[in-house]
Image (cartoon, rainbow, N blue to C red):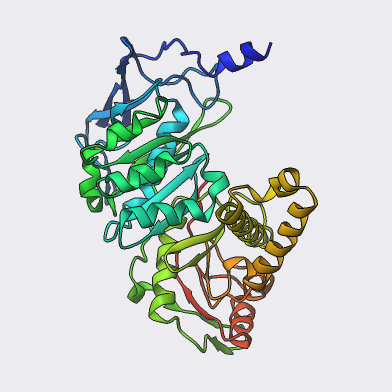
Amino acid sequence: MASDLKAAYKTIMDDHFTPEMEIAFIDGDKRQTLRFEKVSWVIDGEEKGLRYGENPGQEAALYKLVNGNLALGEVTSIGPGNCLAANPELLQSGKHPGKTNLTDADNALNILRYLDDTPCAVIVKHNNPCGVAKAATLTDAYCRANQADRLAAFGGCIALNREVDTETAKRIAENYAEVVVAPEFAPGVMDIFAAKKNLRVMRIHNMADLTRFVARRVVEFKSLIDGGIVAQWSFVPEARTAAQLIPAECVTKDGTVHSIKRLPSPQEYDDLLFGWLVEAGVTSNSVLYVKDGVTVGIGTGEQDRVGVAEIARDKAYRKLADWISWERHVTPYNDLSLKFGEQGKRLMAKIDEEVKAKRGGLLGSSMVSDAFFPFRDGAEVGIREGISAILQPGGAIRDWDVIDCCNDANVAMVFTGQRSFRH
């Protein structure tokens, strides 16, 4: 029985999707048609597209846009000939990619397109980033992203916005990953990756020109249970520089003006913007903490804002404890007592004290929210941990209360004026 269950993940589904697909937008006599071709790869002599969809047993197909230019109102979509995740060059693949491999890679690119000015690494798992970091070198960026959430990074998709050098490749090879995406790979890198036979290595040449995609949109489709479709233009974060952020201010019904007393420092602005651009690839409701160009804790997909702020906080504590344990004892934090017995329990207690003293690495970090705080309690979750700055869209009825809360704690706060929901 066990072998049959494992076999399900190795089975390549039949593909009955058609070789081509067209989507037409019709307005009276005016018709705009987008034409797509199915993408496939030859691996071990077998030509096939996606191995399966989100789960084994679900047929799936990948299509790339080959013709058509859609313009609705004042918005024009990205045209054909600009393939990124829709047509990756597979340099290595022990097995055909699945749908999640492609969507994880795509969401990583969705984040990287805003962070092209410095070496950056994004590690995505289940279509959410688990670690994002920028640094002076690609190796440092990857190591910091991996350190942010070593556990979640296991089996993830690693996307890098610079040519992968041998040092970075060696660090990647120390861990288990499903996918590595980059614009190019230096000589010798593929020899290192060859030891990981099921690692899918994707070269995407257009990554070298990712900034062209910063303000460009595509039509997103969501299929409903009855076959209906919701169509929307993709999201583009409008605030991408410090000058575009708005000092937090609110006027109450009685005419009282509540203004933030302290604006962010240059380093805080840098972290706040970094976090806001990462938010473009995080499932809402979401709150994340950033410090020195690295995500410290990412809370995703929750129903209430206080809860997701707490989840991001708790994850920061857990991930820091695990990283300290791994660095010092080459053992996951949760396995210390299992491996070392009573000594392991003492090691855990010592690590707990250290993590508590560092407040999970949140002390002096910046807090970013994809939607406004309806009450001060969400912001207070971060303030109690010693954050120094907050970025949020603003626009809540009780913005004044959140502003007063920040002023009482000498915490800076700015608004984006734009929500960043992603469902």
Horizontally, residue 348 falls left or right of residue 168, namely right
- Residue 232 visible in the shown view: no
Q: Residue at 39% x, 39% y: name it.
A: 105
Task: Report the front residue among 228 and 160.
Answer: 160
Q: Position of residue 181 (x, y in %)?
A: 34, 39
Q: Residue at 64% x, 70% y: name it.
A: 359
Looking at the image, is 18 positioned above or below residue 407?
Answer: above
Looking at the image, is 130 positioned above or below residue 63?
Answer: below
> Which quadrant of the figure has residue 194?
top left
- Residue 405 visible in the shown view: yes
Q: Position of residue 121 (x, y in %)?
A: 38, 51
> Which quadrant of the figure has residue 361?
bottom right
Q: Position of residue 233 (x, y in %)?
A: 38, 46
Q: Residue at 63% x, 47% y: name it.
A: 332
Q: Position of residue 33 (x, y in %)?
A: 26, 29
> Which quadrant of the figure has residue 170?
top left
The residue at the far right in this view is: 342
Looking at the image, is 417 positioned above or below residue 210?
Answer: below
Task: Report the front residue among 138 and 122.
Answer: 138
Task: Report the front residue among 251 and 368.
Answer: 368
